[in-house]
Image (spheres, rainbow, N blue to C red):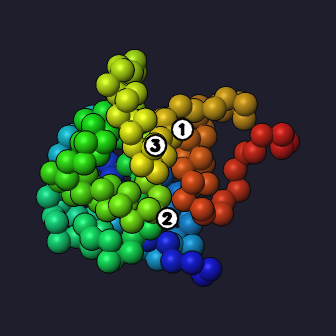
Amino acid sequence: MESSKRIVIAITGASGSIYAKMLMDALLELKDQIDKVGVVMSDNAKLVWETELGDQSYKDYPFDFYAKNDFMAPFASGSAQYNYMVIAPCSMGAIGRIAGGISNDLTSRAADVILKERRKLILVARESPLSTIHLENMTRISRAGGIVCPAAPSFYSKPKNLEEAVGTVVSRIIDLLDLQRDSYRWGSN
């Protein structure tokens, strides 16, 4: 392995649990490129997952899961050297807390650590329409080094179903995580 890949996945209560599921499925496929995956889910994230996907399959993933207020989780400190964090889906509430530097739970604390250590924070923002407050919060995070990757599928690959459309966003996230995976590229056949 060329470099250590320690990834935090945070799942908030925004609609779009399929993004988290398909991202974790992809990370399982790419496990030979990854050292560790830590996951934190809010209570609302579990409820939304169960409502949207009809199951509790988040319990089936072989990753390290941490409680939403477990400040003893390794990625609550920069010394653990988790170098990537994806929040998918990312609620505007989480974005607001991160933009304001409010570390009141493990998700916002881990995001704060990733930003202060100048590592890669990827926010898969899920909201529509966006208010000026939302836009300003995302701008603050972008200026601090975070990446806002909206849950906005592309259509040039001609996705045939919901999973293929969501897969276009997941492929973008995989690229941002510096992982290697075959996916549709603009201009390819």
* Vertical placement of residue 43 versus 180, above or below: above
The mark total stands at 3
Q: Quadrant of the N terminus?
A: bottom right
Q: Amino acid at mark 1?
A: Val
Q: Quadrant of the C terminus?
A: top right
Q: Position of residue 87 (x, y in %)?
A: 38, 49
- Indicate which label's residue lies in the foreground, 1 or 3: 3
Q: Quadrant of residue 83?
A: bottom left
Q: Position of residue 163 (x, y in %)?
A: 54, 38
Q: In this rendering, would 76 be left or right of 70?
A: right
Mark 3 vs mark 2: which is more N-terminal? 2
> In the rendering, which numbered label is found on residue 142?
3
> In the rendering, which numbered label is found on residue 28?
2
Q: Secondary structure at mark 2?
A: helix
Disc 1: which residue: 166
* Vertical placement of residue 134 versus 99, above or below: above
